[in-house]
């Protein structure tokens, strides 16, 4: 026994870790752990400032570490931690995107000036409707756990984008999902709606994870390995069961498409976007989408490129369904947050068009689209959080009538963001659509591109409807007030708007970065 | 900096100034008038610098924008865009000058906001005609919708929201389909040249040699966008709504200039880039064109509303222009190109006069008027001049264009030409009938005689007194005078315009016929 162990000990080496490459992720996860300790040991009144400083510093430090690493990172990328993580150019781009978007989201989360005490409940455990619950609406405390939760989710997303085997990807998926489920239930106002959103997201998310895991198991049965590159090698041979391969891929994709809120796996999206506290919605809408599509790009490119002829037809269908659901149901919405949720479903369809292309242009186009969409969405939710009446945010569309008269600046900013979502030129949304569609077109998907363009126009209708409401309708007499945002929200909205404009007018820099290199295929 | 760039940048800068002055309506109007007059003055050196015998695209300037896709910000002009740019610069000061005569802005809206949007619209429209990069053209084509959307939606009539959204969505959808085609052309170019580009001249070289099936698909994308813009039947339904609801000045811009981007697009993009597809699909386009001529004429005759009347008249005229372009003879295309200018002058004047009438009478219903020439003889005369030019009476500017279109298209497409001639006859009928209903006979109608109730109710005897309706003031006559001079002047001496346009048209046609 001892001899056996001794022999084993000789042969097992600690895996080589490229600390420089994964430093950004380590910083975020480390800061999340420290955040948990803050919750345990800091007195209550110091928690909020402590957490805010810690989160912002962590994101900034991770950004610096990333920036320092990008400059001389190897062109083909590196795989580290026994090949479970692959830090290549797309992963670095996605990390950068995630960090930048998370910065905006954390700024929104940190704001306490719009709603006294912040958008988060003081004691999430109190059941809604009780006396204690009514009492805590007026309190100015908040559940500061939201900060470490957000950092954990962010760390999970970063791992998800760079996971080089399916098992790591699954674990990352759980690390990013579980905190999000919790965060959804923390809204200060409309507690029931918020909790319903959390439960709905959790149940459906758990199902989706199960699908993912089942698919993973089938693929392991097919290839004898969970590594993406091994699966790719296995598909090169002809001696294995196609049933396992495609059933596995199908189930895997269900899990991924669910996270990306692609129709028809979108049913959680409107309810959760509406019920969750708006800053959390912004975080989910922007960052989760980046992570999900980042993961999807990697899985499809690295593991399933050689079988693309078999699955592409199915994804065509999925993309079309998603665009139709997003654009058509978006028309019927009367709630701003639900409307943006349907818009995100339509955008997921457009993103899928680029994801399917599997060319260099498709990859860089989709990456750019994710960056552009994320910033626009964060700023849009930031604006949504400002329009309020006595019961909290006034998200019903009728409340937005004539807003331009009352606060022209806010209306102008929101109009700009809506135009970006609609894909009007000189906004990042247009450049994103342009690069994605041109990649798809040169990869032989002309009919799909035409369908996508038609649904872009349909979707433009509901964005315009809001513009019409804000500018050309008479304001309601008891309409909502527009809160003057505090420094944090102002910073987040400004960041989103400036990036949206900059990427629309001068996209060359970001396009070059997005096109810096492909996935590491080992 | 070329004159062309100055022409694009000046209204943009002016718009900023005017927007800054929007608390003071009078000052803002004066500033806008000054800017637009300066713009008109700039046209003189711009036109003089253009050498008809020179290169195809002149005053070119270019600057890199998105190098990854070979996209440039490049502008330049040929004879056709030159005359369109000139007519925009001419119409904008006239619109501003007649702003107070053509009806009030909705309550609570400042003239400064309105005028700065008009100036932005002017700059963008000039830029669209001047763009020589296909991507830039698309971008401007869509961006141009935004000020127009706010102009219609913010300052229009009762049903303005519906009209603004309809206008935007139609054009936006067309533009998106065009984008797909533009990307298709781009990928053809990147296959062919190894490096993609959106440069117009390069794309023309590459795409015109593409196989016919590819060309047809790409052609259809561009064609749809332009057919919606121009508008050809059956893509026209947004125009009567938009033109009917928009304030008068905006209707002038919309019908007079913006819609010309469509016909301009046929000439600049469809024909040179896709010669084979243009040739093969010409019968289809001609059917739409002739259908537009007849349909527009018949519906114009049946309109109760003056502004919608003008919209349908324009649909008929756009049919004529498209007919000339797709008949592919030098005469017909020159006719169409000059028609683009002459239609802007004639229809622009018609809309302004109609706007003045409507503002004086307080109604746009034709049946609310009658015998108005007795009260306002000069206004009646103006309507007659605009109307005669609209029906292409010899001696007015439109005649030579319409004549060239019919003459040229008769050579290659006699059947279509003959059917379109019916449109000419109808035009005489509906214009004169309009004039007759509004201006001749005894003074009558709710707009001119103080009525007791709405239309249809018995007029109370004491309510029969004539309303005090002013004729045109000296200032108003002065503002309209340039249009009258041009309508008559170009009717007798069209040579400067023909000389400017012809080389560009010939270059376009050689590209088609070289194949």
Image: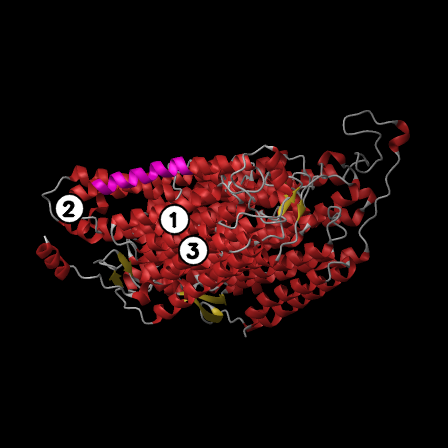
Q: Residue furthest right?
A: B462
Q: Residues within 10 Å of mark 2 (few under 14, many from 20)?
A: few
Spatial separation of the CA atoms under disc 1 and disc 2: 27 Å
Residue where numbered disc 3 is placed: A32
Q: Residues within 10 Å of mark 3 (few under 14, many from 20)?
A: many
Work out whether mark 3 precedes mark 1 in sequence or the reverse, and give the earlier one.
3
Q: Residue furthest bottom?
A: B1
Give the chain of mark 1.
A
Q: Residue B325 at x, y = what percent? A: 46, 51
A53 sits to left or right of B34:
left
Q: Residues within 10 Å of mark 1 (few under 14, many from 20)?
A: many
Q: Residue A111 at x, y = what percent? A: 58, 53
What residue sits 29% from the left and 62% below the top? A88
Residue where numbered disc 2 is placed: A224
Spatial separation of the CA atoms under disc 3 and disc 1: 12 Å
Q: Residue B37 at x, y = what percent? A: 69, 65
Q: Which residues are magenta?
A: A202-217
A15 sits to left or right of B61:
left
Quadrant assignment, res A86: bottom left
Which secondary structure lies at badge 3? helix
Work out whether mark 3 precedes mark 2 in sequence or the reverse, and give the earlier one.
3
Work out whether mark 1 precedes mark 2 in sequence or the reverse, and give the earlier one.
1
Is A451 located above or below residue B143 in the figure? above
Badge 1 and badge 2 in a common chain? yes
Give the chain of mark 3.
A
Q: Residue B247 at x, y = what percent? A: 68, 47
Q: Nearer the viewer, residue A33 or B502?
A: A33
Spatial separation of the CA atoms under disc 3 and disc 2: 35 Å
What residue sits 41% from the left and 55% below the top? A33
Is A220 located above or below residue A50 in the figure? above
Q: Nearer the viewer, residue B281 or A149?
A: A149
Residue A176: numbered disc: 1
């Amino acid at each position: 026994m001892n001899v056996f162990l001794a022999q084993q000990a000789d042969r097992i080496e600690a895996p080589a870790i490229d600390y420089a490459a994964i430093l950004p992720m380590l910083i975020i996860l480390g800061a999340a752990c420290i955040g948990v300790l803050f919750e345990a040991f800091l007195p209550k009144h110091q928690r909020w400032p402590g957490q805010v400083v810690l989160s912002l510093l962590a994101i900034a430090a991770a950004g610096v570490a990333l920036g320092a690493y990008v400059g001389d990172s190897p062109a083909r990328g590196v795989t580290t931690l026994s090949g479970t993580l692959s830090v290549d150019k797309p992963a670095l781009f996605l990390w950068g995107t995630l960090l930048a978007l998370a910065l905006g989201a954390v700024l929104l989360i940190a704001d306490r000036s719009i709603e006294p005490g912040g958008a988060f409940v003081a004691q999430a455990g109190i059941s809604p409707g009780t006396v204690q619950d009514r009492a805590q609406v007026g309190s100015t405390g908040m559940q500061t756990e939201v900060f470490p939760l957000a950092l954990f989710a962010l760390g999970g997303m970063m791992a998800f984008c760079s996971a080089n085997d399916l098992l790591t990807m699954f674990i990352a998926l759980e690390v990013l999902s579980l905190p999000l489920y919790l965060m959804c239930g923390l809204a200060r106002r409309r507690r029931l709606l918020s909790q319903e959103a959390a439960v709905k997201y959790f149940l459906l998310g758990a199902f989706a994870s199960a699908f993912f895991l089942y698919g993973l198991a089938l693929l392991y049965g097919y290839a004898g390995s969970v590594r993406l590159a091994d699966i790719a090698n296995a598909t090169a041979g002809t001696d294995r069961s196609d049933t396992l391969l495609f059933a596995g891929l199908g189930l895997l994709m269900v899990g991924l498409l669910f996270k990306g809120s692609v129709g028809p796996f979108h049913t959680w999206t409107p309810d959760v976007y509406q019920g969750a506290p708006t800053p959390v919605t912004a975080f989910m809408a922007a960052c989760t989408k980046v992570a999900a599509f980042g993961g999807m790009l990697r899985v499809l490119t690295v593991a399933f490129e050689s079988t693309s002829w078999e699955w592409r037809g199915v994804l065509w269908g999925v993309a079309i369904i998603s665009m139709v659901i997003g654009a058509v149901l978006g028309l019927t919405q009367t709630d701003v947050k639900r409307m943006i949720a349907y818009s995100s479903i339509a955008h997921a369809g457009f993103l899928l068009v680029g994801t399917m292309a599997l060319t260099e242009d498709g990859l860089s186009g989709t990456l750019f689209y994710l960056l552009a969409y994320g910033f626009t969405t964060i700023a849009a939710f930031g604006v949504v959080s400002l329009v309020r009446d006595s019961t909290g945010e006034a998200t019903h569309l009728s409340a937005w009538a004539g807003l331009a008269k009352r606060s022209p600046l806010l209306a102008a900013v929101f109009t700009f963001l809506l135009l970006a979502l609609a894909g009007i030129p000189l906004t990042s949304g247009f450049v994103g659509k342009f690069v994605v569609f041109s990649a798809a077109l040169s990869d032989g998907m002309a009919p799909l591109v035409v369908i996508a363009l038609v649904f872009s126009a349909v979707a433009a209708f509901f964005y315009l409807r809001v513009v019409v409401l804000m500018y050309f309708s008479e304001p309601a007499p008891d309409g909502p007030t527009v809160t003057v945002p505090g420094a944090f929200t102002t910073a987040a909205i400004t960041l989103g708007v400036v990036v949206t404009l900059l990427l629309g007018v001068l996209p060359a820099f970001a396009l070059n970065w997005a096109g810096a290199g492909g996935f590491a295929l080992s | 900096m070329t004159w062309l760039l100055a022409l694009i940048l000046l209204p943009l800068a002016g718009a900023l100034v005017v927007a800054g002055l929007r608390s003071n309506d009078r000052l803002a109007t004066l500033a806008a008038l000054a800017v637009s007059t300066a713009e008109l003055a700039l046209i003189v050196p711009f036109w003089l610098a253009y050498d008809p015998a020179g290169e195809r695209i002149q005053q070119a300037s270019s600057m890199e924008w998105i190098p990854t896709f070979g996209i440039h910000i490049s502008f330049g002009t040929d004879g056709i865009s030159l005359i369109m740019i000139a007519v925009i610069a001419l119409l904008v000061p006239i619109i501003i000058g007649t702003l107070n005569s053509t009806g009030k802005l909705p309550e609570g809206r400042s003239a400064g906001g309105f005028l700065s949007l008009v100036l932005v619209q002017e700059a963008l429209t000039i830029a669209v005609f001047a763009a020589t990069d296909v991507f830039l053209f698309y971008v401007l084509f869509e961006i141009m919708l935004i000020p127009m959307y706010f102009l219609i939606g913010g300052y229009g009539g009762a049903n303005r929201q519906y009209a603004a959204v309809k206008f935007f969505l139609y054009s936006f959808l067309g533009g998106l389909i065009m984008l797909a085609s533009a990307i298709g052309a781009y990928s053809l170019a990147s296959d062919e040249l190894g490096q993609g580009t959106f440069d117009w001249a390069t794309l023309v070289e590459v795409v015109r040699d593409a196989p016919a099936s590819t060309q047809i698909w790409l052609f259809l994308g561009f064609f749809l966008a332009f057919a919606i813009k121009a508008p050809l039947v059956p893509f026209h339904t947004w125009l009567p709504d938009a033109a009917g609801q928009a304030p008068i000045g905006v209707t002038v811009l919309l019908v007079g200039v913006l819609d010309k981007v469509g016909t301009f697009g046929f000439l600049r993009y469809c024909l040179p880039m896709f010669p084979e597809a243009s040739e093969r699909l010409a019968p289809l386009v001609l059917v739409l064109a002739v259908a537009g001529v007849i349909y527009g004429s018949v519906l114009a005759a049946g309109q109760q509303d003056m502004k919608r009347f003008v919209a349908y008249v324009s649909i008929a005229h756009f049919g004529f222009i498209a007919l000339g372009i797709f008949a592919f003879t030098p005469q017909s295309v020159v006719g169409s190109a000059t028609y683009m200018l002459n239609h802007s002058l004639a229809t622009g004047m018609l809309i302004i006069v109609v706007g003045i009438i409507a503002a004086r009478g307080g109604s746009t219903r034709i049946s609310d008027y009658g015998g108005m020439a007795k009260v306002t003889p000069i206004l009646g005369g103006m309507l007659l001049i605009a109307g005669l030019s609209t029906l292409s009476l010899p001696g007015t500017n439109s005649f030579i264009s319409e004549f060239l279109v019919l003459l040229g298209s008769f050579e290659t497409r006699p059947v279509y030409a003959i059917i379109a001639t019916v449109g000419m006859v109808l035009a005489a009928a509906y214009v004169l009938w309009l004039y007759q209903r509004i201006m001749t006979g005894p003074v009558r109608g709710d707009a001119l005689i103080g009525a007791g109730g709405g239309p249809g109710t018995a007029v109370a005897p004491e309510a029969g007194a004539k309303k005090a309706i002013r004729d045109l003031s000296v200032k108003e006559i002065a503002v309209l005078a340039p249009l009258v001079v041009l309508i008559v002047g170009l009717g007798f001496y069209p040579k400067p315009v023909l000389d400017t346009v012809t080389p560009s048209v010939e270059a376009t046609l050689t590209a088609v016929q070289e194949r």
